[in-house]
């Protein structure tokens, strides 16, 4: 263990200026005999940060006391109001038990997650770490144990206390924008503050804090952890990773060895072409393929840095998580920056892109090109996820000819073609390159990568009012023609399409579907054209299940997270979940509204075709509303119905390349 220099500990740390993990948490933890911590969130991802010092943790015989104060949702708080004291205690007990289910989820997965769970189990079973849960005594928010505090008891007898916004998570250590204030016992003016934080923690830990109920894990769950941990005579060894030697750089790629055949083929083609688009169905590993390409280029010194860009905070966060995991397997060789939502790290990347990766919203991409001298000085690899979105009129106007600086340019999408948009498609090809590899839904089902699905068309007709709406729209555009007013024909198609997407009798057909088959709302996403139209279905959904939520533009992602965890049955949304979000447990998709273009439909049904590790026999269901006029299906719906019906007949090949 390296000597600990207390003089380097500052009185304040802030993300951007400091690295909270390497500058503060790791050195203090590695030189402590006791660590007391009260936080809203603790994630076993934190153990990845502890991995570098886990030997110090064990050698010091450290005791870690972790008090978790759950950030209860609005629904949970409302539930608390309706529970009596006994019910509230049972709720807390159940939460405290279910928290440890992560052991069962991860213990059979890859080396990294297995080590994390093994180590977590070991330090719990051997009394190195104790966890308790702090809940409000009432549903009043003021009774929550809000303050995030920590105290390090150092080996030399000194103490360090801190308070601030950082949680005990990977995000709190690395990703999020956080700050902490630090108090040191050897500074006379700080000593009273250190004692205050100690007393505050100890009071809560011993269940003496006003307004708190503190719960411990049950003996049953602790015995399970001990039984699992006793498989090891000593602490599980952290997985070893190769150092980036010249021989390693020339001959070894970690990801490439684990790729499916179609991913290896895509990798090979891109390395040969250097630019172009991978058209890969949702769930077939576009992200993993892109990371393997990035890794190969880094290892072979073909690039200095990487820019990853896409639209939508959920997708950007997903990319950040995947890149963080990848970087850990590289022994954290690379600097990872984010420029989206509340993150503003573009400047750091542009100052020195060497061995750096920037994840940036495509809406902010023009700022990358503002310093052309930096782009010309370094070799940057750019990755456009959901590249079809790159062809929008705004991007065509703002980003034309800006990609010529990049040698390596990669586009990813399940549906790169923008139907009815020749200008957008040509722009994408000019900037990124043509489609160089294709692996569609049919290929993926046949190769046992995506699951099979049933297709059920639901018949509906237009109401008298719907027909009047169509007549009025046609009359409006006919008047434009007579007056010589120029208009975009796509505006006409869009207006007519909205009538079908929000047809009156479609709601009646939906009512009949869920009343006859309420199970359709289990593990289900309903796609609607508008929020107002979606809300017309709520009464019928409520009759079948109370476990539903909406997820519209402007709403936070808590409902999406709850749905992914199977805490709710049904999610009602518009466009937001059409692309990129990974929810393997999803079984049913209801296309209450469908686009004329295939792009949206492919993205939407792709949500439910992912294989589910916990349900190997999963077969998805797609429900689609088909309009009949004069006892004949309208052309657009007939074309979609024939296509989806044929696709639903595709079967998994038992000799395919992948099996769950």
Image: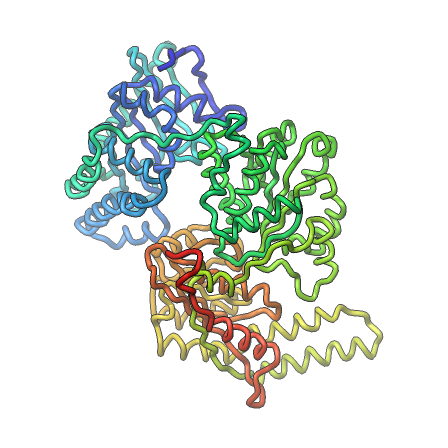
Q: Is residue 103 left or right of residue 257?
A: left
- Where on the picture, by quarter, is residue 563? bottom left
User: Residue 436 appears at what percent x and percent y?
Assistant: 64, 54
Q: Residue at x 74, y 48 (%)?
A: 398
Using residue 539 as the reference point, say whether residue 125 is left or right of it: left
Relative to 619, 176 lies left or right: right
Horizontal side of residue 265 vs 190, given as left or right: right
Closer-to-camera residue (501/391): 391
Task: Report x, y in % for residue 561.
Answer: 41, 51
Residue 314, compared with residue 301, is above or below; it is below
Q: Kindly indicate the quadrant of the structure image that contains residue 103.
A: top left
Image position, residue 97 (x, y; %): 23, 45
Above or below, 540 against 560 in this view is: below
At x 71% / y 69%, what residue is drawn? Answer: 490
Q: Quadrant for the C terminus, please.
A: bottom left
- The residue lying at 55 percent from left, 74 percent from top is 643
- Residue 41 visible? The answer is no
Quadrant of the image containing the N terminus = top left
- Give residue 300's position: percent from left, percent from top: 59, 33
Q: Is residue 298 above or below residue 267?
A: above
How is the rendered protein coloured?
Answer: rainbow
Asked if residue 19 can be seen in this view, the reply is yes
Is 338 or 652 nearer to us in this picture?
Answer: 652
390 over 502 or under it: above or below: above
């Amino acid at each position: 263990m390296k000597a600990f220099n207390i003089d380097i500990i500052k009185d304040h740390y802030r993300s951007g200026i400091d690295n909270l993990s390497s500058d503060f948490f790791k050195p203090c933890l590695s030189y402590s005999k006791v660590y007391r911590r009260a936080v809203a969130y603790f994630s076993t991802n934190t153990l990845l940060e502890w991995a570098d010092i886990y030997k110090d943790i064990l050698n010091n015989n450290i005791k870690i006391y972790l008090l978790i104060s759950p950030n209860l949702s609005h629904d949970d708080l409302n539930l608390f109001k309706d529970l009596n004291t006994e019910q509230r205690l049972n709720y807390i007990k159940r939460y405290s038990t279910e928290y440890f289910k992560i052991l069962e989820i991860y213990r059979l997965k890859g080396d990294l997650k297995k080590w994390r769970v093994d180590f977590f189990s070991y330090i719990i079973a051997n009394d190195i770490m104790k966890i308790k849960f702090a809940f409000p005594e009432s549903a009043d928010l003021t009774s929550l144990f809000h303050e995030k505090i920590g105290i390090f008891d150092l080996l030399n007898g000194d103490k360090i206390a801190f308070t601030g916004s950082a949680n005990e998570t990977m995000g709190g250590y690395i990703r999020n924008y956080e700050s902490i204030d630090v108090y040191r016992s050897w500074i006379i003016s700080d000593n009273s503050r250190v004692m205050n934080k100690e007393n505050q923690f100890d009071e809560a830990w011993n269940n003496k804090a006003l307004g708190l109920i503190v719960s411990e894990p049950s003996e049953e769950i602790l015995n399970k952890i001990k039984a699992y941990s006793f498989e090891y005579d000593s602490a599980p060894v952290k997985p070893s990773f190769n150092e980036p030697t010249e021989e390693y750089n020339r001959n070894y790629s970690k990801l490439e060895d684990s790729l499916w055949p179609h991913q290896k083929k895509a990798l090979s083609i891109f390395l040969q072409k250097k630019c172009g688009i991978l058209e890969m169905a949702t769930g077939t590993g576009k992200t993993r393929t892109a990371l393997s390409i990035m890794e190969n280029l880094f290892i072979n010194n073909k690039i200095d840095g990487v820019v990853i860009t896409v639209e939508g905070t959920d997708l950007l966060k997903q990319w950040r998580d995947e890149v963080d995991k990848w970087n850990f397997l590289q022994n954290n060789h690379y600097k990872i920056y984010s420029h989206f939502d509340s993150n503003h790290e573009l400047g750091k990347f542009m100052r020195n892109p060497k061995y750096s990766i920037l994840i940036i919203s495509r809406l902010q991409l023009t700022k990358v090109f503002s310093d052309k001298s930096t782009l010309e000085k370094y070799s940057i690899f750019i990755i456009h996820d959901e590249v079809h979105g790159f062809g929008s009129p705004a991007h065509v106007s703002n980003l034309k000819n800006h990609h010529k600086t990049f040698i390596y340019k990669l586009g990813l999408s399940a549906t790169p073609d923008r139907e009815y948009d020749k200008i957008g498609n040509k722009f994408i090809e000019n900037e990124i390159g043509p489609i160089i590899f294709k692996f569609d839904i049919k290929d993926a089902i046949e190769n046992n990568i995506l699951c099979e699905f049933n297709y059920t068309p639901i018949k509906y007709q237009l109401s008298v009012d719907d027909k009047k709406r169509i007549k009025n729209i046609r009359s409006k555009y006919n008047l434009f023609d007579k007056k010589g007013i120029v208009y975009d024909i796509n505006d006409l198609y869009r207006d007519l399409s909205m009538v079908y997407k929000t047809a009156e009798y479609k709601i009646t057909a939906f009512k009949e579907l869920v009343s006859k088959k309420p199970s359709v709302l289990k593990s289900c996403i309903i796609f609607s054209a508008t929020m107002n139209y979606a809300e017309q279905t709520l009464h019928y959904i409520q009759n079948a299940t109370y476990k539903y939520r909406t997820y519209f533009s402007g709403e936070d992602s808590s409902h999406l997270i709850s749905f992914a965890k199977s805490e709710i049955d049904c999610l009602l949304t518009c466009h937001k979940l059409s692309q990129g979000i990974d929810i393997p447990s999803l079984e049913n998709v209801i296309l209450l509204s469908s686009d004329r273009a295939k792009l949206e439909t492919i993205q939407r049904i792709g949500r439910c075709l992912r294989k589910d590790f916990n349900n190997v026999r999963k077969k998805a269901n797609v429900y689609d509303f088909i309009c009949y006029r004069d006892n004949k299906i309208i052309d657009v719906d007939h074309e979609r119905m024939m296509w989806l019906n044929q696709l639903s007949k595709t079967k998994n090949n038992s000799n395919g390349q992948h099996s769950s």
